Image: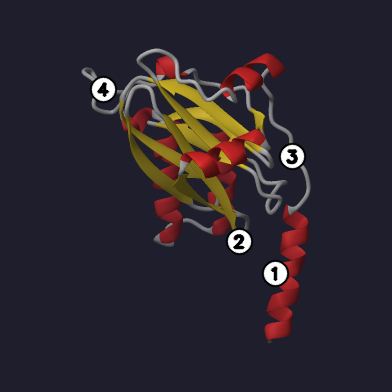
């Protein structure tokens, strides 16, 4: 039995180790982000993914319900944000959530770790220190973000953000809940999930 499980795990790992592509930012923006100098009165957020496992699986990243896009092997997002509270989410087979309170003039590094899943890869967001984060970003390439930081207000800002029920991120969380509760099948979950991701 152990041998069968081992062979299954190996086969899945090989399947997930292919390559996927995401739109990359121009080289000059990548170089500027890797200077690690926050803009005046802003905080810098880096979300990176630097491991080979699960390379073929794109994973959607949102900040306060706003989709930045999808990550893949050796890529990262860079967002300049106003000080305040932010909720970062990684959408894969699961939804991993991490909250940060950003201060002006500081860099924040989040590692999007890939995990083995049942039907596809899972992920885990972890905040790491500056030394580890810089190393991970330096070996990755900047993704062309679909959402600039200027359009992502902090959760504690006056006026707040768009209602969560209107965001794709919230709908993905609700869909995950339906699957966990057994209210929809795995096939229905995957079909609806793909439909939602196409709206990003």
Badge 2 marks a residue whose secondary structure is loop
In the image, which disc is placed on residue 20? 3
Q: Closer to the N terminus: mark 2 or mark 3?
A: 3
Q: Closer to the N terminus: mark 2 or mark 1?
A: 1
Badge 4 marks a residue whose secondary structure is loop
- Residue identified by numbered label 1: 9
Q: Is residue 128 above or below residue 87?
A: below
Q: Residue at x 77, y 43 (%)?
A: 19
Q: Is residue 165 above or below residue 128?
A: above
Q: Is residue 189 above or below residue 82?
A: below
**Inter-mark Cα distance, 2 to 3:** 17 Å
Badge 3 marks a residue whose secondary structure is loop
Taking the view exactly as shown, the residue that stands out farthest to the left is 158
Q: Residue at x 74, y 39 (%)?
A: 20
Q: Is residue 125 left or right of residue 57?
A: left
**Inter-mark Cα distance, 4 to 1:** 44 Å
Q: Is residue 200 left or right of residue 57?
A: left
Q: Quadrant of the N terminus?
A: bottom right
Report the front residue among 48 and 116: 48
Q: Position of residue 11 (x, y in %)?
A: 77, 66
**Inter-mark Cα distance, 3 to 4:** 35 Å
Q: Closer to the N terminus: mark 3 or mark 1?
A: 1
Q: Is residue 30 above or below residue 85?
A: above
- Residue identified by numbered label 2: 116
Circle 2/circle 1 CB separation < 8 Å: yes
Q: Residue at x 42, y 38 (%)?
A: 88
Q: Closer to the N terminus: mark 2 or mark 4?
A: 2
- Residue identified by numbered label 4: 160
**Inter-mark Cα distance, 2 to 4:** 35 Å
């Amino acid at each position: 039995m152990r041998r069968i499980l081992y062979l299954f795990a190996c086969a899945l790992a090989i399947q997930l180790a292919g390559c996927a592509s995401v739109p990359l930012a121009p080289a000059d923006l990548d170089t500027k982000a890797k200077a690690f100098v926050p803009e005046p009165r802003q905080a810098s957020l880096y979300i990176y993914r630097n491991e080979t496992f699960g390379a073929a699986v794109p994973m959607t990243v949102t900040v306060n319900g706003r989709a930045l896009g999808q990550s893949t092997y050796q890529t990262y997002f860079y967002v300049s944000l106003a000080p305040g509270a932010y909720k970062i989410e990684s959408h894969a087979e699961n939804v991993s959530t991490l909250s940060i309170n950003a201060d002006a003039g500081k860099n924040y590094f989040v590692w999007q770790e890939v995990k083995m899943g049942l039907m596809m890869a899972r992920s885990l967001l972890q905040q790491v220190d500056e030394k580890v984060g810089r190393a991970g970003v330096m070996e990755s390439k900047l993704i062309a973000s679909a959402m600039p930081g200027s359009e992502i207000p902090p959760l504690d800002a006056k006026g707040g953000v768009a209602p969560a029920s209107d965001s794709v991120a919230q709908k993905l969380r609700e869909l995950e809940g339906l699957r966990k509760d057994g209210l929809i099948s795995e096939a229905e979950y995957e079909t609806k999930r793909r439909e939602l991701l196409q709206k990003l």
